[in-house]
Amino acid sequence: MQFNFERYIIQCMETSKHPLPTTSIPPELLGPESLLLDNQLCFALYSASLTMTKIYKPLLQKMGLTYPQYLVLLTLWERDEVTVSTLGERLFLDSGTLTPLLKRLESGGFLRRQRAVHDERQVIVSLTAAGRNLRNEAQAIPLHVSCSVGCSLDEVKMLTQELQRLRAAMAGNIG
């Protein structure tokens, strides 16, 4: 029995929470073109993410941070004293990935973790004075990154919103 790619695509679209009309299936989804690397949304996102991380790396190295650590600090600068689970939800990270990041930031003196008084199962993460002060040093990073991407600030904002919409749509189609 031969695999029917067109039927597979149609079934995926019918079971998706955001299906496309089957009459609008572009030809590149149905043939050999569908497997070209440059036609893959996943690769465009992955390679853009790698490139973005390379832009951030020298900026963050000056501060003694990795990109994931920077994301944790960004989250805490928005809202301090949150639970580990809240932080994980905000960053789309599981506790197995987040806990080592938090330990390194804690050993660097940027944050502290404490058991919640009202529920010892919860761990509250809060910034130290050094963590709060690091925000001043980080202020120039977004502008530097915006200049590096070669887009206007409006384009960056629109692209960010579109990627957030895409992430939400994809998350709505996960199991």
Image (cartoon, rainbow, N blue to C red):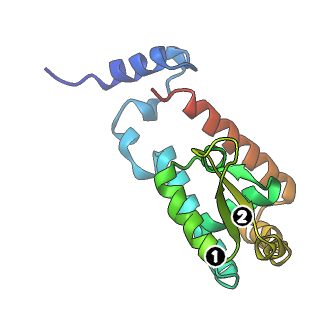
Which is nearer the eye, 64 or 171?
A: 64
Local secondary structure at mark 1: loop
Which is nearer the eye, 157 or 141?
A: 141
Local secondary structure at mark 2: helix
Which is nearer the eye, 142 or 72?
A: 72
On the image, numbered disc 2 is attached to which residue?
73
What's the amino acid at mark 1? Leu
Residue 61 appears in the rendering: yes
Whether residues under marks 2 and 1 lie with C-beta atoms below 8 angstroms apart, the answer is yes
On the image, numbered disc 1 is attached to which residue?
65
Which badge, 2 or 1, is on the more N-terminal residue?
1
Question: Based on the displayed image, in which of its 4 quarters is residue 74 positioned?
Answer: bottom right
Residue 173 screen position, x and y as percent? 52, 27
Q: In the image, 38: left or right of 70?
A: left
Above or below residue 110? Residue 35 is above
At 80% from the left edge and 60% from the top edge, which residue is drawn?
77
